[in-house]
Amino acid sequence: MKRSICILAALILAATSCQQVEMETNAPEGRVRTFTASFSNLMKTSLDGLTPIWSEGDAVWLSDGVNQEIVGVRQEDIGKATAQFSTSSLTGDVIYACYPASYATGHISGTFVVFNVPQFTDGSFRNANICVATTDDDNLSFKNATALIRFTKETADVESLSLICSGDNFLAGWMSFRHLDGSYSGATYQAASSIEIDMSGPGPYYAAVFPRTMPSGSKIVMTTSTGKQYVRTINAENTFTLNKIKSFSVDAAFSGATLVSDGWAGSGTEDDPYLIASEDDLHLLANNVNNRVDYYSGKYFRLVRDISVSNFRPIGSTNEGNGFQGNFDGNFHTITINSFDLGHLSTQSTNGLEVYMGLFGRIKGTSGTTPRSVIRDVHVAGTIDTGNDFVRGPHYYGSICGYATGNVIFEQCGSSLGMRLFGYYANYPSRAKLMAAGGLVGYAAATVQIDRCYNTGNLAAYSNANSGNRFYVGGICGNLYGGLITLCYNTGNITGQITQSGYGAFVAGIAASNTTSGSVEGCYNQGKIIAYGASSTSAKAVGITYNAQAMYCYNSGTVKSYYAGSSTSEIANSAGISYRQSGSYQHCYYLNGCASTDMLGSGGTLTDCTYFVNGDETNGGLVEGDTTRSLLDAMNGYLATVITSEHTFYPSPDADHLPVLDYVSRNILDY
């Protein structure tokens, strides 16, 4: 919906008043229902006073709590203040709506509309507000769900601006709206504390935010046309209110800003973290850690925008020094890694150092409870192929971290990074080769926790480990050496191949391990898992874990083992669940027929570990094909009885209806 004189979405602010939609409830299935959306004379925007009209491309999202539909404006209604929308798929008594339609995520159990307040905006008014509505009668009244900020700029040389909230006050992300009583739920499932505005155009510039207070101590970071960054601390609270426009003068902020000449904006404290806003910022952090200038123990970093990096040297790339020891808040932004500095890593290996590859090569948390290193809310993307030059491979690889020891927590991190990885050191055949590769973390020690993380990227890892070496590959973690993984999932295809005889390649959907003290809980794998060995006994593939204990997990991915590198030489070394030794395996399930057996090995204690078959949207699958045993109920049993989590498993909207965590069905981590 746009103004009559330019392409701007004035409807959203206009919806501050009462927008009426007439409808007939209890419509039988297949009957066309028509809603008439109209505006009163009071619905004039505070921007220019013009009456909003419907424009080409406008659409609303409608749902009755079961079905949902996006309905576009009719050609004959373009340019009018009223429009009609028709549907035959919505038959429920209660109708829910969101405008613009593209920001609605869906309904959760018929209770919430979940919608996305964008972290980024191009400054146009179309992206600047969101309206939601619900009704159980003939009246559908839209109301604003977000507040609006307007930035004005006259002479300041500012091409982009980041507004960064201090503390736990979030500006953007995902928000819920309660259908039944029309109130806000008060919960933000995921949120970011910063927004970014591109100011290269003429302006003015708008951004949608959650209606809340931005406290004193928040910051405005401004980047000039020459790439210099200036920071201005806001000394007074600012309240962003529904139906109101809050204005910021960029010129006033710029006149009192401080040039960040060395390092980053911020002081490195929890309330005032160092701000990572560019590729150079990220390279600087890596260089300082790798050159042992500082390991940043007890310091805090925050990513304030999406960043793309090339020729990257991981933060803590070798075992020389302590690696990164601080805290990193990705702020729900994405770091795209286009390439690693493979030549440098190869040289480091030639010099006798262990080499680690990932966003963070090595993280070394403290041995006590505080300070700890927390890596949260960051997503890593890209596609990398190291080529067939085995000399360039690392010892440990993970998209987020190659090697983690000490008190380290990975929380709500994700990866879609596709990696084809070789680890072979021809000049030093007696040295350890590629030992572990993981979709997120390569090696995780006993005190490391990986919580609510995911991997969707394909990982293919190859090693020439000699006799006595084991090679571990996992969708979440390569070698879980006693750590804990909770509420994580993998959908990427995971392949591990060993080229020489020995103990072989051990490949798992969630985590491989060479100790039984690690634990995987409330996780699932849906990716294809393949292990190649140099002999008929040197490759093992499992759906969930190798050695590590597991509880309340499931695997639906195909699991295969082969030898001699041939996809036609399949061996019976694949398990739908795990390779078991000592330890406990409870309530773990695998899709019937996905592997040669349920378990490999014979140790440990088994409790309710069996197969399931596909079900429907009410059960998510049937354990042992029994109509009274729901896979969905089994997975939710972990949340209810073991950790009392706020999360819930829901049936996937996909055809197989397998259980997925609620943050997945809401696309919270789908950056």
Image (cartoon, grey):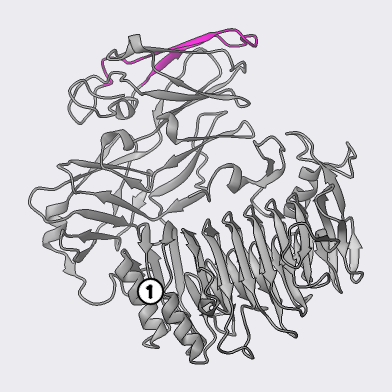
Q: Is residue 381 left or right of residue 573?
A: left
Nearest the viewer among 564 and 304 is: 564
Q: Quadrant of residue 577?
A: bottom right
Whether residue 272 appears in this view of the structure is no
Query: Picture quarter containing residue 60?
Result: top left
Residue drawn at 69 percent across, 54 percent down: 528
Report the magenta stretch's main SS.
Answer: loop
| Residue type beneath disc 1 | Thr
For disc 1, the marked residue is 269
Q: Position of residue 144 (x, y in %)?
A: 38, 32
Label 1 crowd bin: few (<14), some (14–19), many (20+), radius 10 Å: few
Q: Is residue 19 magenta?
A: yes
- In this picture, is 466 found above or below 563? below
Q: Is residue 650 above or below residue 274?
A: above
Residue 641 lies, in percent from the top left, at 77, 55
Quarter of the image that includes the N terminus: top left
Q: Is residue 116 above or below residue 492?
A: above
Residue 128: give x, y in percent of width and height: 31, 37
Please give the range of residues in magenta: 18-43
Is residue 1 visible in the rendered image? The answer is: yes
- Is residue 355 depicted above or below 158 in this figure? below
Q: Indicate the quadrant where residue 247 lies.
A: top left
Q: In front here: 384 or 101? A: 384
